[in-house]
Image: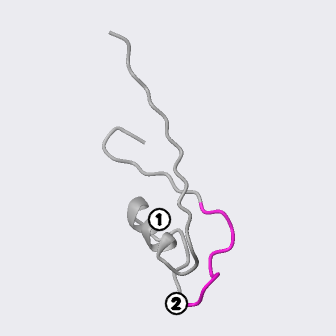
Amino acid sequence: MPEIKKTAMVTVCGRPNVGKSSLTNALVGEKIAIVSNKAQTTRNRICGVVNRGDTQ
């Protein structure tokens, strides 16, 4: 039986200062995005790779 491979790209978007960077950090499991109470702290694209078991 052939191995099934799936790929996904996820975009997190929303209003300023609602926790998008915190959510990204939590999903990846490490701090890759700056988190601050000040709006518009993260202005550049953030990319993260999640590894779970033998899946990336």
The answer to which quarter of the image holds residue 25 is bottom left
Q: Name the residue under label 1.
A: 24
Q: Position of residue 44 (x, y in %)?
A: 69, 68
Q: Mark 2 points at which residue?
A: 37
Magenta highlight on residue 4? no
Residue reaching furthest to the bottom = 38
Magenta highlight on residue 43? yes
Q: Where is residue 45 in the image (x, y as percent from the top left)?
A: 66, 63
Residue at image location 68% in from the left, 73% down from the top: 43
Which residue type does callout 1 highlight? Thr
Q: Which of 14 and 4 is in front in this view?
A: 14
Q: Where is residue 37 in the image (x, y as percent from the top left)?
A: 52, 90
Residue at image location 54% in from the left, 45% down from the top: 9
Which residue type does callout 2 highlight? Asn
Residue at image location 43% in from the left, 42% down from the top: 56
Estimate the spatial distance between the alpha carbons at disc 1 and disc 2, rounded to whole Å.
Answer: 16 Å
For the magenta stretch, what is the residue range?
Answer: 37-46
The crowding category of the residue bearing disc 1, from other C-alpha atoms within 10 Å (few below 14, some 14 to 19, many at least 20), is some
Residue reaching furthest to the right = 44
Q: Which of 16 and 32 is in front in this view?
A: 16
